[in-house]
Amino acid sequence: MFALVESGSITKLLSGNRGITIDGIQHPRAIFTVWTEAERNAIGIYTVEMDKSKLKSDEWYINTDVTYTFGSGKVTGSYGDATAKAHADTLFTEQDKTDDLIPDGKDVGDVATRGLKYRLIQQVKKQAESELSKTDWYITRKAEKDTAIPSSITTHRNAVRTKQAEMETAITNASDTPALETLYTRNSENVRPIGDIPQLED
């Protein structure tokens, strides 16, 4: 991305995929790829240098829009402080009732917006359900034909349920959004603190 700077101020952001007219002179699109940075700067066009030091994962945070500034001979695009997404459910309040923001069938104290914890727990439940479904046929066969369930299958199903419970507890006990992010951050060996639902080996 590029920016047009006129009289010390950014007047336009440019994608670089089309030509531009500056001071009555038509410049072709090639200036964005063929010209040097110094040559572009001479006509007021600068490459935008992105500062992503405050950019955070949008899985856990709401990032701000990018702010573009010109100074010290360069254009910088930077993010403001990110806001953590709510980790707990948001409930309807008395003020919501006063402002008539509570829909029919809901009241003060009811869930207004689900937080990250709820969504993550639902995700864990679905993962466990999906894994258990792979061996549900053993349970059906046992019920219909009284055929014994292999011990390895019983062990695996128990391990899935145990891990599901552990993961849900870890999510519930997380104090805030950064703590949730830490639970899900994988290390160099692709292991995360919260772990994963066990998978049935082929």
Image (cartoon, helix red, strand yellow):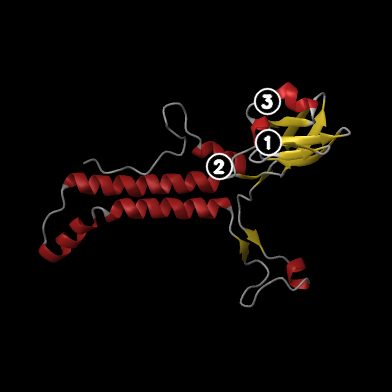
Query: Three-letter amino acid code at disc 1?
Result: Pro
User: Which residue is painted at 69% across and 41% down in the image?
Assistant: 82
Query: Three-letter amino acid code at disc 2?
Result: Leu
In the image shown, does 46 or 151 lie closer to the viewer? 46
Q: Residues within 10 Å of mark 3 (few under 14, many from 20)?
A: few
Secondary-structure class at tag 3: loop
Mark found first going from the N terminus, 2 or 1: 1
Residue under circle 3? Answer: 35
The Cα–Cα distance between marks 3 and 2, rounded to whole angstroms, is 47 Å
Report whether residue 117 is seen. Answer: yes
Residue 4 coordinates in the image, percent (x, y): 78, 36
Q: Residues within 10 Å of mark 1 (few under 14, many from 20)?
A: few
Report whether residue 81 is seen. Answer: no
Residue under circle 1? Answer: 28
Q: Which corner quadrant of the image does residue 19 belong to?
A: top right
Mark found first going from the N terminus, 3 or 2: 3
